[in-house]
């Protein structure tokens, strides 16, 4: 006799998703039913190298260059690196592997993957898309800034090398003289920034043009999907490494490079007792790998089913960490040179003042006996350490004119975020011989780092939409161009004079919390709804070997508790510390910390709610559909209870030889019902049901 045909309707399948693996159900009817025609038409990577470059290009971004070095510097140097590696191994790699495996096996974007694993949590994919769009909006603004600086690098001398002259007074512009040429160029020439977020100001026309150019580059690179963006990846993913190695070699030749490296890696083990450091390390692991965006899932969905995604997870995570270390070395040899140059200039200035004091008051007793070993006439032989030791002994006798010259204090200035790239590094570029060349090279590197991450972010938006809505898939070009055009229009918020404050708002609050919430639900859906054993069973079929059982406990307990703890810590910090931002005061020519006004706080809350709301909405929608399905089955005579008795699991070797595919099954199959094309477990009728049907056949019923 023939086995019963598969259930065709979505409602009939809903009860199956709660109690058994769809892998096993779909595989019971042969491979022909498991592989849909959609998979045949799905794009694929031309090579493994292309795929790895895409994943590395997405995960390695601007945060590796300016966020990781800052955190490492502020939180104990080598001790922070050890903490980061520990969290990377027990949280980052398992979650990264989970997303890779889910995307590769189900072969859909984030919406389809989480809808497939648990229909009740289908909203996770939509939340990922919204957060990806948030990130794309402000991330492309940073790319526009890089374009602006790269365009200004083709000048000699560089425009941020000296302070401009005020035409009215024929003197140096006061704002520049009170800060620095690089700070003045960044805040006044590039951003033309207002004093607070409440002063919006008009649009910055130059930055608006740069933003349009940035979105045009993204649209052209992605207009044909991964086929076009992958070709760009060959350059955008590899070129930053070339530049980083060039800068490292050049930086090691500079005076102060070793001081920078020593300062960077000096371990401060006491930081392990600080919960704030653990929160920052976990956040950096989370964002460094791009978890929750859906981009990792989208990229892996274009892989062959039997690709070794476990090896990919380890390899990409390792490359990401080594890139962070490389970027940190480059940053601190350069900052060490900058700090040493400024500190030596400070020493020379103070020794010059000492000479004036000696010449004006040669009989001053305190000074006459205070520094017999300081050679104030030959300033080149006095080191920073010698000067600081002398200053510590005699500062009380010198008065306020003579100041301390701290190399460590200079290392602390301008090493975070945009301050590192657009203030500190630009200052160093001006000190290099052939400064326009080095400046162009640096901002071209930032441009490529930003673009490779931007491609992955956009893929995390477009792939789920095209997989879930077939109409959009037929108009891929229109969807890509329309998305980029919408991104540019909404991105005009960031090109007004107060735009930098909105960039900080989106980066600090609007994207962070929703992403953590997304990953918490992702981990819950795999570990507790779908089940880690079933998930590992499916991965075993895909890889042809079973991953270590340690992943089961990491997913169920360690990763989930770590992400819930990170979410709680972020919320508590936001509530008790209060959202603040750093503003530039034009009169004082310095930065200051301000609190967000009420309307800005409301905007932050609205953005967080908008990004998180698809999860509960999707859950309620699924429950209502299931209730409707149960009601319809109840009217037909208890259909669900009957269905649950029809199937039981059996090994593939026990399959009935009489199994065959019913006519028209492939045409009516629900898209992508199988977690994998072939499952290791199959389903057959229960013996009691078989006996009943045999009796029916004997009686001719």
Image: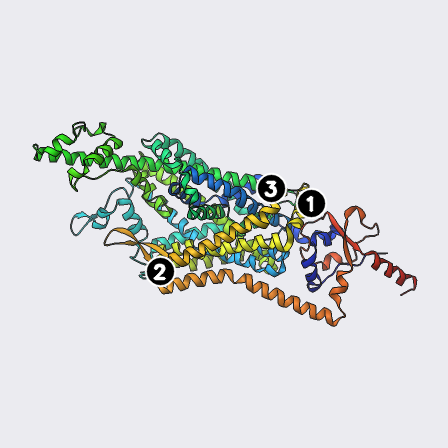
Question: 243 left or right of 312?
Answer: left
Question: 59 left or right of 198?
Answer: right
x, y percent for residue 383: 25, 30
Rendering colour mode: rainbow
Q: CA distance from mark 1 to mark 3?
A: 13 Å
Nearest to N terminus: mark 1 or mark 2: 1
473 to 628, vertically: above or below: above
Categorize mark 2 by other alpha carbons within 10 Å: few (<14), some (14-19), many (20+): many
Nearest to N terminus: mark 1 or mark 3: 3
x, y percent for residue 197: 33, 59
Categorize mark 3 by other alpha carbons within 10 Å: few (<14), some (14-19), many (20+): some
Nearest to N terminus: mark 2 or mark 3: 3
- Residue designated by label 2: 596
x, y percent for residue 501: 36, 56
In the picture as drawn, the residue positioned furthest to the right comes out as 699
Question: 277 left or right of 555?
Answer: left
The residue shown at (32%, 40%) is 411
Question: 357 left or right of 403?
Answer: left
Kindly tell me whether residue 238 is visible in this rendering.
no
The residue shown at (37%, 33%) is 262
- Residue designated by label 1: 541
* Residue 529: quadrant of the picture: bottom right
- Residue designated by label 3: 310
Element class at badge 3:
helix
CB within 8 Å, label 2 to label 3: no
């Amino acid at each position: 006799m023939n086995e019963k045909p598969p259930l065709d309707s979505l409602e009939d399948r809903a009860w199956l998703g709660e109690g058994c693996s769809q892998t096993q159900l779909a595989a019971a009817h042969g491979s022909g039913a498991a592989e849909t025609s959609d998979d045949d038409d799905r794009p694929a990577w031309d090579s493994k190298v292309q795929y790895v470059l895409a994943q590395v290009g997405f995960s390695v971004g601007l945060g590796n260059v300016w966020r990781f070095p800052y955190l490492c510097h502020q939180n104990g140097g080598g001790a922070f690196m050890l903490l980061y590696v520990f969290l990377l191994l027990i949280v980052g790699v398992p979650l990264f592997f989970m997303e890779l495996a889910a995307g590769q096996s189900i072969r859909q974007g984030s919406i389809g993957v989480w809808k497939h694993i648990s229909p009740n949590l289908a909203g996770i994919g939509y939340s990922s898309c919204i957060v990806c769009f948030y990130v794309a909006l402000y991330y492309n603004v940073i790319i526009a800034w890089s374009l602006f600086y790269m365009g200004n690098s083709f000048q000699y001398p560089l425009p941020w090398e000296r302070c401009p002259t005020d035409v009215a007074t024929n003197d140096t512009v006061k704002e520049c003289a009170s800060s620095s040429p690089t700070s003045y160029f960044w805040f006044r020439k590039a951003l033309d920034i207002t004093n607070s977020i409440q002063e919006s100001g008009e649009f910055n026309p130059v930055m608006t043009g740069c933003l349009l150019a940035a979105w045009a580059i993204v649209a052209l690179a992605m207009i044909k999907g991964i086929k076009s963006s992958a070709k760009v990846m060959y350059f955008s993913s590899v070129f930053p490494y070339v530049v980083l190695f060039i800068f490292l070699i050049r930086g090691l030749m500079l005076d102060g490079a070793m001081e920078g490296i020593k300062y960077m890696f000096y371990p401060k083990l006491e930081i392990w007792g600080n919960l704030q450091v653990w929160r920052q390390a976990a956040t950096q692991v989370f964002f460094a790998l791009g978890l929750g965006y859906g981009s990792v899932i989208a990229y892996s969905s274009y892989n062959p089913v039997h690709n070794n995604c476990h090896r990919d997870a380890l390899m990409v995570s390792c490359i990401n960490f080594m890139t962070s270390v490389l970027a940190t070395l480059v940053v601190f040899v350069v900052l060490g040179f900058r700090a040493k140059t400024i500190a030596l200039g400070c020493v020379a200035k103070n020794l010059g003042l000492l000479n004036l004091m000696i010449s004006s008051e040669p009989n001053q007793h305190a000074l006459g006996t205070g520094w017999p070993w300081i050679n104030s006439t030959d300033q080149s032989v006095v080191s920073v350490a010698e000067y600081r030791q002398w200053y510590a002994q005699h500062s009380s006798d010198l008065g306020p004119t003579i100041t301390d010259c701290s190399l460590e204090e200079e290392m602390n200035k301008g090493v975070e975020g945009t301050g590192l790239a657009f203030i500190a590094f630009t200052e160093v570029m001006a000190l290099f011989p052939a400064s326009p060349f080095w400046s162009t090279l640096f901002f071209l590197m930032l441009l490529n780092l930003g673009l490779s991450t931007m491609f992955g972010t956009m893929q995390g938006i477009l792939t789920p939409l095209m997989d879930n809505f077939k109409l959009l898939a037929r108009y891929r070009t229109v969807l890509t161009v329309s998305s980029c055009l919408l991104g540019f229009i909404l991105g005009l918020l960031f090109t007004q004079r107060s735009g930098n404050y909105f960039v900080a708002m989106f980066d600090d609050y609007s994207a962070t919390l929703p992403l953590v919430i997304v990953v918490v639900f992702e981990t819950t859906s795999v570990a507790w709804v779908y089940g880690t054993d079933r998930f590992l069973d499916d991965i075993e079929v895909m890889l042809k070997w079973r991953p270590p059982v340690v992943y089961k406990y990491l997913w169920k307990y360690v990763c989930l508790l770590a992400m819930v703890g990170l979410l709680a810590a972020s919320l508590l910090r936001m509530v008790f510390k209060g959202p603040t931002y750093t503003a530039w005061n034009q009169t004082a020519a310095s930065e200051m910390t301000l609190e967000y006004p009420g309307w800005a706080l409301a905007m932050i809350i609205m953005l967080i709610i908008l990004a998180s709301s698809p999860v509960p909405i999707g859950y309620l929608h699924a429950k209502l559909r299931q209730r409707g399905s149960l009601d319809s089955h109840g009217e037909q005579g208890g259909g669900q209870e009957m269905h649950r008795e029809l199937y039981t699991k059996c090994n593939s070797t026990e399959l009935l030889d009489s199994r065959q595919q019913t006519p028209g099954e492939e045409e009516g199959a629900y898209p992508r019902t199988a977690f994998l094309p072939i499952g290791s477990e199959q389903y057959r009728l229960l013996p009691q049901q078989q006996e009943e049907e045999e009796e029916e056949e004997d009686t001719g019923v």
